[in-house]
Image (spheres, rainbow, N blue to C red):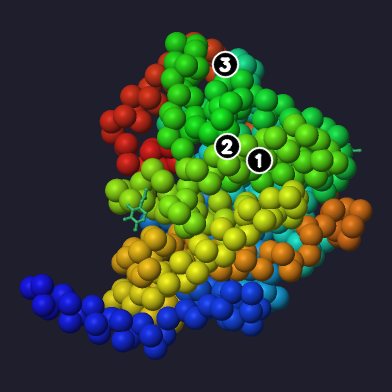
């Protein structure tokens, strides 16, 4: 048995030297070629543009939000490498999922649609505006307006009734998680608010960004040490039950938004303190030496499908932070490079099924082992693509604003005054809402635990 395994190992090693993803850092041709191989593998998971499928959707087991995250990554891929191969598919996906109401609230997703799910699509649209991704035809929704639509709806959903403010995780009262206020939902709101402030110069967005960050601190979701906890549950009218698990994307989304605010406020020291604080906490928490890890679940090996994609977003937001807060570059860039090198070494898989990229280039999840760990999927592939391509962030153009070449058209009242999504439902009273909260908690911890814990 032992011997047999070893032999397999040797064969795998030989095969891997023929097709592995070669990466020479700081050599643009090499980085682009590596990114192109990994991106091809990533888009190999996408079926939404096939006849009879729905543009923008990934097949099972991937949730809708992860597709939004993937198209956001692919916009950055185009921006960093100049490779237009996927632009048509990206545009088609974003416009289709924007849906008739032009706000990334497609009725098909109602059953599981949280503020964070909407957020990952809205952030893709924001990246499109900032990177001058080709604007859609005038009769179609525009990138900037799509981000504003999500912003406007979040501002309306801000809930002062419990916890002194904050966005709930879920949008609809009937979904489990409506009684949970979490960092990623508020992080999406914060991140988009800061970027809209920078893009448009409109102070209202900057005020909201400051308010959201202050709320996160007030409720203990961002600690004095700049740890970022997952969320608080509303229970008996209180918000004392905190889920203290730390996920890399929660740190990343607040780190980047804080860096954008540092830029927006002409380097206000408070925002610098927040950037530096979250960055320090991120490096403490999400690195094994110089290599990024998903600290809570990676080593023990129980990250779920969603969590297997979080390192990619932390990488994206660390790279974006170097653009907005240049003093962080000397700390962040070496970490981007060490993780890129490690991630490329994990892209040597040849799984028998499930991977449609170039054999021998499937990316695994762990970057700390010097090889392929056998876990594959959209998350693994997207993480590695980010790891490799964002090492070029120092050569990329700064994200534009409406004053520095941005062409995307905004609509300040986008997403507002829409017909109700469920006209048959009457307004919910406080009593009913508390009851619904109780019910969803019961559901969360029993019947459909698996899917409920996805974003938790
Ligand atoms: C789907 O998108 C991929 C990648 O952009 C492209 O190669 C392929 O031709 C597209 N398929 C269809 C049916 O449009
Ligand atoms: C909703 O589902 C229907 C049926 O599968 C599909 O035709 C439509 O394109 C979907 N809409 C969106 C926005 O995904
Ligand atoms: C600034 O943003 C707010 C919030 O969306 C909006 O109500 C207002 O009209 C905007 N102002 C301008 C000048 O666009
Ligand atoms: C760091 O990575 C090594 C190699 O995979 C592993 O043995 C070790 O347990 C990791 N440490 C942590 C804290 O994850």
Q: Residue at x 78, y 34 (%)?
A: 269
Q: Position of residue 411 (x, y in %)?
A: 83, 45
Determine if residue 391 is in view.
yes
Q: Residue at x 33, y 86 (%)?
A: 15
SS state under label 1: helix
Q: Quadrant of residue 336?
A: bottom right
Tell me: 135 left or right of 309.
right
Q: Residue at x 33, y 24 (%)?
A: 442
Tell me: 192 left or right of 362.
right
Mark 2, Cα crowd under 10 Å, few <14 / some 14-19 / many 20+, is many
Residue labelled with disc 2: 185
Q: On residue 162, which mark appears?
A: 3
Q: Residue at x 45, y 54 (%)?
A: 289
Q: Earlier in the sequence, mark 2 or mark 1?
A: 2
Q: Are marks 1 and 3 in contact (CB under 8 Å)?
A: no
Tell me how far mark 3 sits from mark 2, CA to CA. Answer: 16 Å
Mark 1, Cα crowd under 10 Å, few <14 / some 14-19 / many 20+, is some
Residue labelled with disc 1: 276
Q: Nearer the viewer, mark 2 or mark 1?
A: 1
Mark 3, Cα crowd under 10 Å, few <14 / some 14-19 / many 20+, is some
Determine if residue 414 is in view.
no
Q: Are marks 2 and 1 in contact (CB under 8 Å)?
A: no
Closest to the observer: 157 or 351? 351
Q: Nearer the viewer, mark 1 or mark 3?
A: 1
Q: Position of residue 374 (x, y in %)?
A: 31, 67
Mark 1 Cβ inside 8 Å of ligand 4: no
Q: Position of residue 251 (x, y in %)?
A: 56, 41
Mark 3 Cβ inside 8 Å of ligand 3: no
Q: Position of residue 2 (x, y in %)?
A: 10, 72
SS state under label 2: helix
């Amino acid at each position: 048995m032992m011997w047999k395994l070893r032999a397999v190992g040797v064969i795998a090693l030989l095969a891997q030297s023929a097709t592995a993803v070669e990466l020479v850092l700081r050599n643009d041709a090499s980085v682009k070629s590596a990114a192109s191989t990994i991106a091809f593998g990533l888009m190999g998971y996408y079926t939404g543009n096939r006849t009879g499928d729905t543009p923008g959707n990934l097949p099972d087991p991937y949730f809708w939000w992860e597709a939004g995250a993937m198209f956001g990554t692919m916009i950055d891929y185009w921006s960093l490498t100049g490779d237009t191969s996927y632009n048509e598919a990206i545009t088609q996906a974003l416009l289709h999922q924007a849906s008739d109401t032009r706000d990334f609230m497609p009725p098909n997703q109602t059953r599981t649609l949280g503020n964070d799910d909407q957020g990952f699509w809205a952030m893709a649209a924001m990246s499109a505006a900032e990177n001058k991704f080709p604007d859609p035809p005038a009769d179609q929704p525009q990138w900037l307006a799509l981000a504003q639509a999500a912003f406007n709806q979040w501002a309306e959903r801000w809930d002062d009734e419990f916890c002194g403010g904050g966005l709930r995780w879920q949008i609809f009262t009937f979904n489990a998680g409506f009684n949970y206020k979490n960092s990623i939902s508020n992080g999406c709101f914060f991140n988009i608010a800061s970027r809209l402030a920078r893009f448009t110069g409109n102070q209202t967005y900057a005020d909201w960004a400051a308010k959201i960050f202050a709320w996160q601190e007030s409720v203990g979701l961002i600690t004095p040490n700049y740890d970022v906890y997952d969320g608080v549950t509303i229970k008996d009218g209180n918000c004392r039950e905190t889920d203290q698990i730390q996920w890399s994307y929660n740190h990343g989304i607040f780190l980047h938004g804080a860096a954008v605010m540092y830029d927006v406020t002409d380097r206000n020291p408070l925002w610098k303190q927040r950037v530096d604080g979250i960055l320090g906490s991120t490096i403490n928490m999400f690195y094994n030496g110089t290599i990024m890890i998903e600290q809570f679940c990676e080593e023990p090996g129980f990250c779920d499908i969603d969590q297997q994609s979080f390192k990619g977003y932390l990488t994206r937001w660390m790279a974006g932070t170097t653009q907005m807060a240049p003093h962080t570059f000397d700390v962040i860039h070496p970490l981007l490079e060490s993780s890129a090198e490690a991630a490329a070494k994990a892209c040597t898989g040849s799984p028998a099924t499930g991977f449609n990229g170039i054999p021998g280039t499937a990316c695994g999840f762990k970057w700390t082992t010097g090889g392929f760990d056998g876990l594959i999927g959209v998350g693994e592939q997207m993480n590695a693509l980010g790891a490799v391509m964002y090492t070029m962030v120092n050569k990329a153009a700064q994200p534009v604003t409406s004053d520095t070449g941005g062409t995307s058209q905004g609509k300040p009242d986008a997403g507002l005054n829409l017909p109700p999504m469920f006209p048959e439902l009457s307004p919910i009273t406080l009593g009913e809402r508390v009851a619904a909260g109780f019910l969803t908690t019961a559901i969360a911890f029993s019947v459909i635990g698996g899917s409920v814990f996805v974003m938790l």
